[in-house]
Image (cartoon, rainbow, N blue to C red):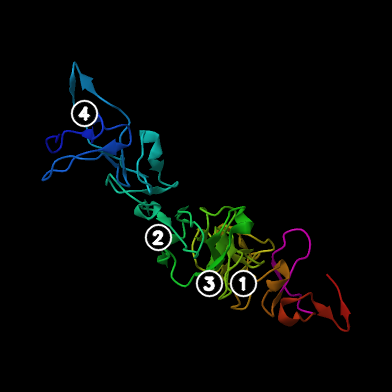
Amino acid sequence: LETQAGTGLDMIHANQQCIQCQKGYECTQASVPCIECTPCDRGFYKDSEFENGTEWIEESCMPCPENTYRDQFGASERAGCLLCPVLSSTSGAVGQKSKTDCRCTRGTYQIQVPGNDSPCLLCPRGLICFQNETVLPVVEGSKWDILPGNFFRMEGNVFSLIHCPTGYEVLNLTHEGQECSECTAGYECTSSIGLKCTPCSVGKYKEYKSTESCRACDEDTYNINISSTSRSDCTSCPKDATTKGKIGQTSKSACSCSNTSYLDPIGTNQCIPCPKSAVCIKGQLPIFGERYTA
């Protein structure tokens, strides 16, 4: 007794009858008579048996859906197709036979560790990732290294931001949030190994978020505060007083009057003409003989 090729039936010699291929098996030889049902290939499954009245209906093994794989023969249900790991896919392909057919999706990276399953990880904001260990920093000059993921409470190895170039600081509260960030208004980072932005010192200011350093207050002004965010934070010297061309002054004492006047310490806080009987040295209080007096 022989059956026609591709009927999906199996022949038992002793009983001289054709029987249906059970779940997980098929008989689909196209060029020779079907003698024996064979297990579904890796990447395929068969979870049903069909009968239409007295006629068996052929059914071949079905490919595992996209984003799944099957690495063993004879799958008898669709659940035998295993899901790809998180953040990976088969890129639309079906019937995949191995976990290696699951590739990391866009916006991720993977650090291969021999002998271990290497997870696909979301790309940090400070990197451009290419689904493998190839990455490019968003900010040129930033230094990244492969380190254990313990700091982020993650298993395996991860890309970690070590330091940034001048004008940036390191943000690394979360793995995905790692990036070099420009210093905000009122802060700067002048080190070539940027870790943390620091406040603008007295006598300076910075108005915008950028990689620029804090600017010195103009001549004839001073600033006693740190972290200043506006040029208007630089206070003008009293009328007719100057800083003698100096910039970035940190106190009112940097403002001085001419040699023919002095700075009134009370009241108007303006330059007052020096009395005719006195001498005002460098705009300071008048000198009457050997004594200072107002």
Image quarter in which the C terminus is found: bottom right
Mark 3–mark 4 distance (CA, rounded to whole Å)? 83 Å
Q: Secondary structure at mark 4?
A: strand
Q: Kindly identify which residue carries mark 1.
A: 248
Mark 2–mark 3 distance (CA, rounded to whole Å)? 24 Å
Q: Secondary structure at mark 1?
A: loop
Mark 4–mark 2 distance (CA, rounded to whole Å)? 60 Å
Please tell me whether mark 2 or mark 3 is closer to you in this view.
Answer: 2
Please tell me whether mark 3 or mark 4 is closer to you in this view.
Answer: 4
Q: Residue 17's mark? A: 4
Instruction: Rate crowding at label 1 as few (under 14), some (14 to 19) or many (20 or more) other CA atoms within 10 Å.
Output: many
Please tell me whether mark 3 or mark 1 is closer to you in this view.
Answer: 3
* Left or right position of 208 against 11: right
Give the extent of the magenta segment.
262-277
Image quarter in which the N terminus is found: top left
Instruction: Rate crowding at label 2 as few (under 14), some (14 to 19) or many (20 or more) other CA atoms within 10 Å.
Output: many
Could you say which quadrant of the image residue 280 lies in? bottom right
Confirm whether the magenta stretch covers residue 24: no
- Residue at 89% across / 79% down in the picture? 291
Q: Residue 279's mark? A: none
Is residue 56 positioned above or below 252 on the image?
above
Mark closest to the chain's N terminus, 1 or 2: 2
Q: Residue 166's mark? A: 3
Residue nearest the viewer, comparing 173 with 90: 90
Please tell me whether mark 4 or mark 1 is closer to you in this view.
Answer: 4
